[in-house]
Image (spheres, rainbow, N blue to C red):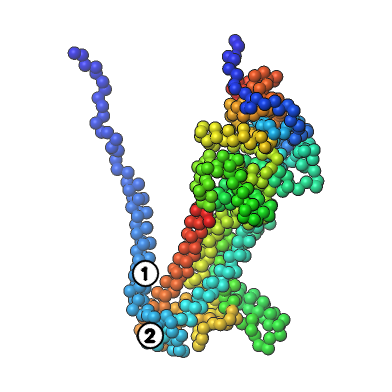
Amino acid sequence: MTAPVLKPLVVGSTGADRDASPPLIEIENLSLFYGKAQALKNISMTIRERVVTAFIGPSGCGKSTLLRCLNRMNDLIPGVRIQGTVKIGGHDIYGPDVDVIELRRRVGMVFQKSNPFAKSIYDNVAYGLRLQGVKKKAELDAAVEQALRQAALWDEVKDRLHESALGLSGGQQQRLCIARAIAIKPEIILMDEPASALDPIATARIEDLIRELKKDFTIVIVTHNMQQAARMSDYTAFLYLGELVEYDKTTKIFTSPRDKRTEDYVTGRFG
Amino acid sequence: MTHVQTTPRTTRGFKSSKPDLASFFFTGLTGVATALILAILGVILLNIILNGWPGVSWRFITTIPKRDFFDPAATGILPMIVGTTIRVIVMTVFVVPVGVITAIYLAEYAPRLSPVTRVIRGAVNNLAGVPSIVFGLFGLGFFINFVGRNLDAIMQNPGPVWGKPALIWASLTLAVMTLPVVIVATEEALHAVPAGVREGSLALGATKLQTILRVVLPQALPGILTGAILAVSRAGGEVAPILFTGVAYYMADLPKKLTDQFMDLGYHVFVLSTQSPNIDQTRPVLYATVLVLLVLTFALNFTAVLIRAQMRRKMRMAA
C-alpha cells in the first residue's frame, strides 16, 4: 500500500533565482543545552542574504531555540549552554568581545505573541531609535513614517499615531511590532511564528509583508504552518528532535525531500 | 392506527427532589457577614458625621488653638491638619523611591531562588508584621538617639537640633513601617508586566536598565501607585510610631522646619479623649476632630487614586 501522493504545494514565493545571493549567517556544529537536556544537536547550516529562510518541524524540535541563537536571546534564560559557532557576516557572535546590544540592533526580532509597549503607536516605533540617541523630531517623524509604510500599517494608523498601541487589533499590533523592528534598520529579521495567533486575513497580510520585506532584509522565520513555509520561503530547514534533518531550497523540500522523515512531515503524516 | 408504546416521561421536569439546605444556609451566612460589616461601618460613620458635623466650622479648621484646646468655643485644629498632612507627604517622598528600588532589585535583578533573596523577602514580610509601637521605639533609638545625635556632634551644634523628636524622624519612622507595603505592591506590579514586553525591548537593542526604566516601570506605574496609596492609608491614622519620634502635645505655632516637632490629628484625638478636665464639654471637639481626621485620610487617599486613574487613562490613550 502506497501513501497517497499529495499534490505539490505552490512553492517559491518570487521565483527569483537567489542562488547567487551570498551567505550571511554561518552556523557550525551548534549545540545547545538547557541544563542537561540537549535542545540542539550539532547543527550546521548557511543562511543566505536577502532570502526568506523557514525553520519548520513539530513542536519542541528546537526551531525557536535555533532562531533565538541568532540574536542571543537565549542568553536571558538561566542554565543555557552553547557549543559551536554562529557567524554573521564573518564575525562570531558568541566571541568574547561581542556587544550583544549591537548584535540585537543588527538582528531584529518579531515574536509569536505581539508585544507592543503600553505606549503610543509613534513611541513604539520610535523606541529603538531613541535608544540609539536619536532625538530630533523631524528625523524620528520620517523614520516612524517610513517604518510604518514598510510594515503596511501607515494608512491605518496615520491619523492616530499618538493613541495607544494597545488599541490596535491583533494583526495590526503584529505589524506594529514588525515596524518597530525595521525602524532601526537591522540587516536580519528573525520571526518566531509571527502569524500563529492571527486570523487568516491578518496572516495573509503578514505574509504579503514578508514577501515585500525580503527585498531589503534577510528574513529567518519559524513556522509550524507548512503551507506558510511553502508559500513564502526560498529555503526551508526541517528540524526534528533538535537535529537539522534537511535543509534545501523550499521547492526541493516540499517536492522531492531526500530524508524519509522530511517527507513524512511535509506530507502531513506526523507532527 | 397503531400506537408506539413509549416509556412514560417523567413529569417532574428538572426540579430537585429536596431543597439544598446547605447552599441556602451558606448563602445566607455570607450575606449576614457582609451586612454586619456594612452595618458596623455605617454606625461608625453615621455616629461620627452626626456628632462631629456641628463642631466643624471654618474657624475650627483654620484656628491655631491657645493652650486650652479642650474648650469648643476657642479651639481649632489647623496645626494638627498641617502636621498630619506634612508627615504623610514627607513619608511618601522617602518610602516610594526606596520601596520601588528595592522591589526592582527583588523582581528584576535578584536571583530567583538564591538564599539571599529568600532572606530579603522574609525580612520584608516580617517587617510588615512588626507592631507599630515597636517602630516608634526603633525610630527613637535609631533616628533620634543614633542618627540625630551624631549629626549634632558632627555639625557641632550647641544644643540638640537633630537629636530630638522632629517631623523628619516621625516621617522616616512611618516610611520604615510602610516600606513592605510599597515593596510588595511594586514587586507585584513589575511581575505583572509580561515577559514578552521585556524581550521585545531587549531585542531592539535595549540594555536591561533601559528596558526597566523605559518600558517596565511606566507600565507598572499604576500598580506602584496602588502601593503608595496603601502606605498613605496606613500611615495617615497611625499614632504609635510618631509618639516618641516627633509629635507634640501642644505647640503654639505651625511647624516651620523638618526639625520642628508637630501636632497630629490622631494623637490629638487621644489627648482630647484622655486629658480633658471636662469630658462632656470636650466631646463635641473630639467628634469634630475625628471627623476631620477621617476626611483628611480619605482626601489623601482620593488624591492618590485620582492621580492613578489619570495615569491609567493617559496610558490607554497614550500621550
The residue lying at 41 percent from left, 78 percent from top is B289
Residue A102 location, x and y as percent?
73, 47
Q: Nearer the viewer, residue B212 or B41?
A: B212
Point out the image quarter for the N terminus of chain B: top left
Q: What percent of the width, then of the height, locates residue B159?
A: 66, 88
Amino acid type at mark 2: Pro
Which residue is tagged 2?
A: B72
Q: Characterize the local packing of mark 1: few (<14), some (14-19) or many (20 or more) Cα atoms within 10 angstroms.
A: some
Q: Is residue A38 left or right of residue A177?
A: right
| Chain to which mark 1 belongs | B
Mark 1 vs 2: CB contact within 8 A: no
Q: Secondary structure at mark 2?
A: loop
Cα separation between marks 1 and 2: 21 Å
Farthest residue, direction left? B1
Is residue B139 visible in this depiction of the protein? yes
Q: Which mark is residue B45?
A: 1
Give the number of the disc on residue B158. Answer: none
Tell me the residue at 64%/43% (across/down): A182
Where is residue B57? Give x, y as percent: 37, 80
Q: Residue drawn at (45%, 66%), measured in percent from left and top? A: B302
The residue tagged with tag 1: helix, strand or loop? Answer: helix
